[in-house]
Image (spheres, helix red, strand yellow):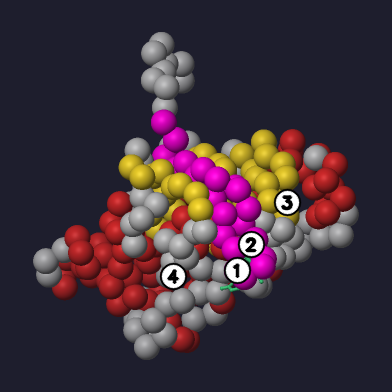
């Protein structure tokens, strides 16, 4: 679609000079990035690169040593995690964190509670996300009884239930059995088609190529390369540090 007057679109998320030190280690060092509305940014890098720490800083579960986070036109650097959630940010975790003693539907209802006045409304709304992630036949199963792939789906349903403007997804395919991966990727594609803005942490270069508009490669907390996934994959330092040793299936 060609728009005659495409407005100068402000990024939905803008991170400036983000740094996090743990004692002597700079887990994230002077990182800047932007994510445009409706786009998918992939964060890449070897183990310990600072990817999850970056998510924790954006979502507010860690306080940065320095740096600024602008979200939807607002400086949210001093917002608490729940205030960031209310502002429209949601995340999924590398290690899934549902309430094990609650069922699938109850887990999602907890996430949509603030939008509804009755349990019936909460349940009806939650059912939409449960169906979207393909867990309709597991609605009343306790979260502790789910497979790893199902837990990842539940994480997505819980995150989507908060109606986020931005969704941060930490390793959707990580630790999941091979046969669950295509379904999880289809789910991300569905979100993309619905215009959901996403930042994904992902190791699998094939997945990054397929899903993301742009990628940033980090190493030891430092931004090393960014651009289209193909540009990043071709960057000499990325090849040396990553693609040489980690296979596409890493
Ligand atoms: N709470 C913490 N306290 C101290 N050091 C931490 C803490 N969290 C992370 N680190 C360190 O910060 C660095 C970055 O870790 P992080 O978890 O962000 O990496 P990552 O890129 O997500 O790696 P992976 O691919 O293994 O998930 C590592 O050296 C890690 O040991
Ligand atoms: Mg991580």
Q: Residue at x 73, y 45 (%)?
A: 224
Residue position for label 4: 154
Going from N to C along the chain, the mark reached first, 2 or 4, is: 2
Q: Are marks 1 and 2 in contact (CB under 8 Å)?
A: yes
Going from N to C along the chain, the mark reached first, 1 or 3, is: 1
Q: Quadrant of residue 177?
A: bottom right
Going from N to C along the chain, the mark reached first, 3 or 2, is: 2
Q: Are marks 3 and 2 in contact (CB under 8 Å)?
A: no
What stretch of residues is rendered in magenta?
Answer: 10-31
Residue position for label 2: 27
Q: Residue at x 59, y 38 (%)?
A: 213
150 to 65, vertically: above or below:
below
Give whichever of 154, 203 is nearer the camera: 203
Q: Is the shortest distance between ligand 1 and the CB of mark 1 under 8 Å?
A: yes
Give whichever of 14, 169 is nearer the camera: 14
Give whichever of 66, 11 is nearer the camera: 66
Q: Residues within 10 Å of mark 3 (few under 14, many from 20)?
A: many
- Viewer-nearest of discs 1 and 3: 1
Q: Residues within 10 Å of mark 2 (few under 14, many from 20)?
A: many
Label drawn at residue 22: 1
């Amino acid at each position: 679609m060609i728009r005659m007057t495409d407005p100068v679109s402000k990024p939905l998320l803008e991170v400036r000079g983000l740094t996090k030190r743990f004692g002597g280690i700079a887990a994230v060092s002077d990182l800047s990035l932007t994510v445009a509305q409706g786009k998918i940014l992939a964060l890449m890098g070897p183990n310990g690169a600072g990817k999850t720490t970056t998510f924790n800083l954006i979502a507010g579960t860690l306080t940065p040593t320095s740096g600024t986070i602008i979200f939807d036109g607002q400086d949210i650097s001093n917002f608490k995690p729940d205030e960031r959630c209310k502002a429209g940010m949601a995340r999924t975790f590398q290690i899934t964190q549902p309430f094990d003693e609650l069922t699938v539907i109850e887990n999602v209802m907890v996430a949509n509670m603030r939008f509804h006045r009755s349990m019936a409304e909460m349940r009806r709304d939650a059912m939409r996300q449960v169906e979207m992630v393909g867990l309709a036949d597991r609605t009343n199963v306790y979260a502790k009884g789910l497979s790893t792939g199902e837990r990842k789906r539940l994480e997505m349903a819980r995150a989507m239930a908060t109606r986020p403007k931005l969704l941060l997804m930490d390793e959707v395919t990580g630790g999941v059995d091979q046969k669950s991966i295509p379904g999880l990727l289809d789910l991300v594609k569905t979100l993309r088609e619905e215009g959901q803005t996403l930042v994904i942490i992902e190791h699998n270069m094939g997945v990054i190529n397929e899903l993301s508009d742009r990628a940033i490669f980090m190493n030891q907390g430092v931004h090393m390369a960014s651009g289209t996934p193909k540009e990043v994959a071709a960057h000499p330092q990325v090849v040396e540090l990553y693609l040489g040793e980690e296979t596409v299936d890493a």
